[in-house]
Amino acid sequence: MKFRGRAWVFGDDVNTDYIISAARKEAVRDPREAARHLMEDIRPGFAALVAPGDILVAGSNFGCGSSREAAPVVIQAAGIACVAARSFARIFYRNAVNVGLPLVEVDTRGLEDGEEVEVDVPRATLTRLRDGSVRRGLTLPPFMLAMLAEGGLVAYYRRHGRLPWEDADAADARGAARPAGGERLA
């Protein structure tokens, strides 16, 4: 899961109601229709600018707020390939993985709207293509990578008939996130 695309940069504390407003997520049931309203409260017209494969880049605490899966679903429906942020709200993080939205927790400071970046999800790296600099983040545990590779939790279960952490091939399935170098975080 490696993605190369144009970065759309947002700051810290982008909550789920900014991603898709509460009024929109209640009124619009089709994710593709809701995607037309992505980030409209903090960047009007944003959804019309997004092209398939673009990468959403954010600061700390991305996805704070409600626990509904609508936010990552709408990001996917808009064509965003993945999300890279300094940190994620935990419930958003798990919801994103559960619905198959790739994400990487990595230092995003100094990135600018429109610049080309490459995100390698299994290696937890973000490469700034204009200068080749590589930022290393936290790798996802193997069972989360397996879920993402299948398109999310439900897709994984449908294909394998079991949950990813039940799979004997998912070594260290209950492991914590690790820095890209592989050492375990406390």
Image (cartoon, rainbow, N blue to C red):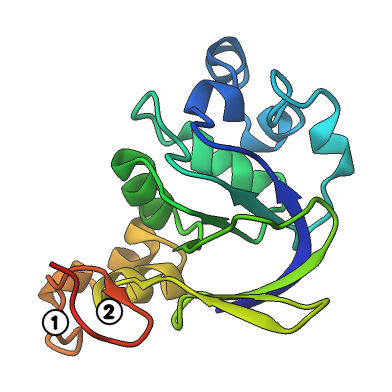
Mark 1 surroundings: few (<14), some (14-19) or many (≥20) residues within 10 A = few
Q: Which residue is mark 1?
A: 172
Residue 143 is situated, as x and y percent measured from the top left of the image, at: 25, 73
Q: Is residue 123 left or right of residue 14?
A: left
Mark 2 surroundings: few (<14), some (14-19) or many (≥20) residues within 10 A = many
Residue 48 is situated, as x and y percent measured from the top left of the image, at: 87, 37
Q: Quadrant of the C terminus?
A: bottom left
Number of numbered labels in the structure image: 2
* SS type, badge 2: helix
Q: Which mark is residue 4?
A: none
Q: Which of marks 1 and 2 precedes in the sequence?
A: 2
Determine the residue positioned at 20% across, 83% down: 170
Query: Visible in this render: residue 162?
Result: no
**Amino acid type, callout 1:** Asp
**Amino acid type, callout 2:** Pro
Label 2 to label 1: alpha-carbon separation: 7 Å
Q: Which residue is mark 2?
A: 142
Find residue 91 and report its image quarter.
top left
Q: Are marks 2 and 1 in contact (CB under 8 Å)?
A: yes
Find residue 159 and report its image quarter.
bottom left
Determine the residue positioned at 65% across, 61% down: 81
Determine the residue positioned at 31% across, 68% down: 144
Q: Quadrant of the N terminus?
A: bottom right
- In the image, residue 155 sits, relative to residue 74, either above or below, namely below
* SS type, badge 1: loop
Q: Is residue 15 left or right of residue 165?
A: right
Query: Visible in this render: residue 18?
Result: yes
